[in-house]
Amino acid sequence: MEVWYIILLGYILTKARADSPNIILILADDLGYGDLGCYGHPSSLTPNLDQMATRGLRFRDFYSTGTVCSPSRASLLTGRYQSRNGVYPGVFYPGSRGGLPLSEVTIAEMLQSHGYKTAMVGKWHLGFGLNGTYLPTQQGFQHFLGVPFSHDQGPCQNLTCFPPNISCYGTCDLGEALLPLFLGEKIIQQPVDFTKLVPKYQKFSKSFIRAAVKENKPFFLYYASHHTHYPQFASVQYTGQSIRGRFGDALLELDGSVYELLSTVWENGIQNNTLVIFTSDNGPETMRMERGGCSGLLKCGKSTTYEGGVREPAIMYWEGKIKPGVTSELASTLDILPTIASLTGASLPNIALDGYDLSKLLFNGHPSPRNTFHYYPSSIDRNKGIFAVRLGKYKAHFYTQGALHSETTPDPDCHVTALLKSHDPPLLFDLSTDPAENYNLLKDGIPVDLVPVLNEISAERERFEKTVKYADSEINKGTDPSLRPCCNPECSPKPDCCHCEKKRSFH
């Protein structure tokens, strides 16, 4: 009797897992709030994202936690502010000693323990470490095809555009490692040929989805695109096809990847059981001018705590489940992990989380459980804490600072010359009527009707800071050039000798 009970229980669990929704999480890189056609850009060609927005739920008030890559990605995967997981200040480099701590529980680890197949494609940027200590395969991803750091951290000679041998516009950090392409924990190409990279990603992703469907297993695919980070690139199919120039070509290839993923979902008949989430890691590098993305009507961009630095485009699509529309409800990348846990029945990590379950918002149109958001700068100082707080429609800046990444705009507040400044009383904006943060409500004193608002925001700031136990900084562990990945580890001189290419099939 006991044996039959165990068999029956196993059958029930297997069926429950097979019926669990598939999750595809697509993350753009340095994409601005105003870069997509469905967010108002007049010359961006993004037909597939626009269609996804038409058939899904498009967010107007969706936030990433980080103003630069590594912190924002750490928070996305863990549902925790970077102050808690230690991924601050700034970003990881190829020789960084630290990485996303292995003690942190990622979405992939949460779902893998719940019977999911897991895969990550694209830009990791959460550390490499000694012998690949921090690679995605150590963080819950069973399969990985991608580059462990940002593509501007390697030499640009391998970043070529069509026609052949014509270099892409832009410069990279020439002192860093040749960019390696990993399959699992092995380098299969170094340096990466970016003109052929995205087709490899698409082939790998399709193969992963089809294999999961064939095995009747739910899956989690994290597709972290290199687009539209500077310097831009595109494969032959997309180069020269956009009226928005090189940035537009890269964006068009990103949009093409969305098409390939959604087509694969439909071809395999799993569209009614697949949640697709699209967003970006942080705002655009306005310092790159027309090659750096667009914040739309929002103030400043990357590396600032103004809206343009962290408010992102976001679309959630689930055919037949999520009612199409547009929402101004407050949401964040922090909310993705607890929402996925709720939808899949996976157990939440037994650790302090900063996200909320958005499922009632997605399916029933209920108000978002999130009413606050806390803005950290790229360089966290635990003595200062958060720079700004959003409470409902109001946002208060306690500190402001410009940034090199947000240069070239006409607004001097965005520039690197806008030094760190404290504000007492804070700058206060009504984002429902002034999302561009143009009109400080406290410029001429504190109106009586805003005193309760200020008191509530100050109380929220104090409450939140009391909950945060700052983790030791992983990025401040420093760098070691010997940690830079090389496919020929014993060769010399590095990095020039780190050349290889190994044929691999993704079928």
Image: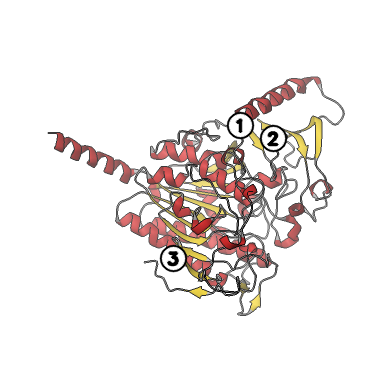
Q: In the current view of this chain or complex, which residue is farthest to the left?
A: 1
Asked whether disc 3 touches disc 1, contact meaning CB atoms under 8 Å apart, the reply is: no
Relative image position of residue 5 (x, y in whole percent):
17, 35
- Does residue 234 appear to the left or right of 260 in the view shown? right
Q: Is residue 34 above or below residue 398?
A: below
Q: Is residue 439 visible?
A: no
Pick whichever of labels 3 and 1 is earlier in the sequence: 3
Determine the image quadrant of residue 310: top right
Q: Look at label 3 and name its amino acid.
A: Lys
- Does residue 32 appear to the left or right of 441 in the view shown? left
Determine the image quadrant of residue 292: bottom right
Pick whichever of labels 3 and 2 is earlier in the sequence: 3
Q: Look at label 1 and name its amino acid.
A: Val
Q: Quadrant of the N terminus?
A: top left
Pick whichever of labels 1 and 2 is earlier in the sequence: 2
Which residue lies under the disc numbered 2? 385
Q: In the current view of this chain or complex, which residue is farthest to the right?
A: 444
Q: How is the image coloured?
A: secondary structure
Q: Residues within 10 Å of mark 2 (few under 14, many from 20)?
A: many
Which residue lies under the disc numbered 1? 468
Which residue lies under the disc numbered 3? 203
Relative image position of residue 6 (x, y in whole percent):
19, 37
Q: Residues within 10 Å of mark 3 (few under 14, many from 20)?
A: some
What is the number of the mark on residue 124?
none
Q: CA distance from mark 3 to mark 1?
A: 42 Å
Q: Look at label 2 and name its amino acid.
A: Gly
Under circle 1, the secondary element is: loop
The residue closer to the viewer here, 347 or 474, is 474
Under circle 3, the secondary element is: helix
What residue sits 43% from the left and 45% below the top?
109
